[in-house]
Amino acid sequence: MTDLSNIESSNIWDHKPWWCQPWSILLTGIVLSSGSWFIVHIVWITAIVSSLIVVWWVYFLILYPRMFKEYVESQKTM
């Protein structure tokens, strides 16, 4: 396991490349949701795609950064 006791920031976005930032995650989800509608024009398929994207957003934009911050903070206190 990596030693995170001397890590400067507990903000996960400081450690991610430009293509894995919140704006790119949101933009990708919007493009995929919109794309599913423009390609198939079927509401239930777009609803399923959009629901999966919302789950993806909740995990990667809310839960994962929170868990990373808690983990880094716990490693700093050790």
Image: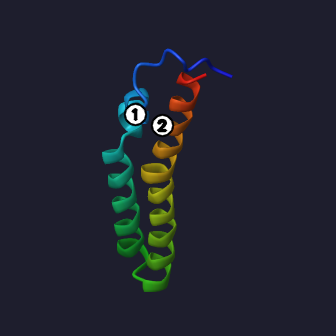
Instruction: Residue 11 in the image: state x and y as whole percent.
Output: 40, 33
User: Which of the image's four quarters has the N terminus?
Assistant: top right
Colouring method of the image? rainbow
Q: Residue furthest front?
A: 77
Instruction: Residue 9 in the image: state x and y as whole percent.
Output: 40, 25
Secondary structure under tag 2 reads helix
Disc 1 target residue: 11
| Viewer-nearest residue: 46 or 25 | 25
User: Which of the image's four quarters has the C terminus?
Assistant: top right
Task: Give the amino acid at mark 1.
Answer: Asn
CB-based contact (under 8 Å), mark 1 and mark 2: yes
Task: Give the amino acid at mark 2.
Answer: Lys
In this rendering, is residue 7 above or below 46? above
Q: Which mark is residue 58?
A: none
| Viewer-nearest residue: 24 or 61 | 61
Residue sitting at x 36%, y 40%: 21
| Quadrant in the picture for residue 40 | bottom left
Residue sitting at x 42%, y 85%: 43
